[in-house]
Image: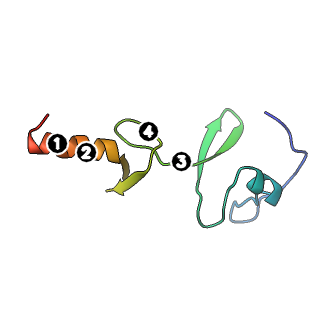
Amino acid sequence: MKSTGIIRGVDKMGRVVIPKEIRSMLKIESEVDSLEIYVEGDKIILKKYHPKCVFCGDLAQSIPYEGYDVCMDCIDKLTALKEGSI
């Protein structure tokens, strides 16, 4: 893990501002991207969230359905299964 030397405080609501340089480097856009939050020992790890298919784990273009992301390949397979062609 590489230190940036940047220190940020936590406000009363528990928020921390991610410096613009880091957001630019990771191509994190306000109100577009989300972050996944992990805890590892005494570390909090933020990772840019990439939706992935709940069935195959593919990061391809997925469509949200009932709170889950499903890729087009799996949608096609489910459709074929429903139609009895598999």
| 45 relative to 50 in the view: left or right | right
Compare marks 1 and 3 and give the one earlier in the sequence: 3
Res 67 seen here: no
Residue 50 numbered tag: 3
Compare marks 4 and 3 and give the one earlier in the sequence: 3
Figure coloring:
rainbow
Instruction: Tell me the distance, in whole angstroms, between the alpha carbons under discs 2 and 3.
Output: 21 Å
Q: Amino acid at mark 3?
A: His
Compare marks 2 and 3 and give the one earlier in the sequence: 3
- Are dots 1 and 2 in contact, CB under 8 Å? yes
Write down the quadrant of residue 16 in the picture: bottom right
| 13 relative to 3 in the view: left or right | left
Instruction: Farthest residue to the left: give it.
Output: 84
Residue at the location (40% across, 51% down)? 62
Numbered disc 4: secondary structure: loop
Q: Position of residue 57 (x, y in %)?
A: 42, 37
Residue at the location (43% across, 38% down)? 58
Q: Position of residue 51 (x, y in %)?
A: 48, 48
Q: Position of residue 47 (x, y in %)?
A: 63, 45
Residue under label 4, please give it.
58
Res 23 seen here: yes
Residue under label 2, please give it.
76
Numbered disc 2: secondary structure: helix
Q: Residues within 10 Å of mark 3 (few under 14, many from 20)?
A: few
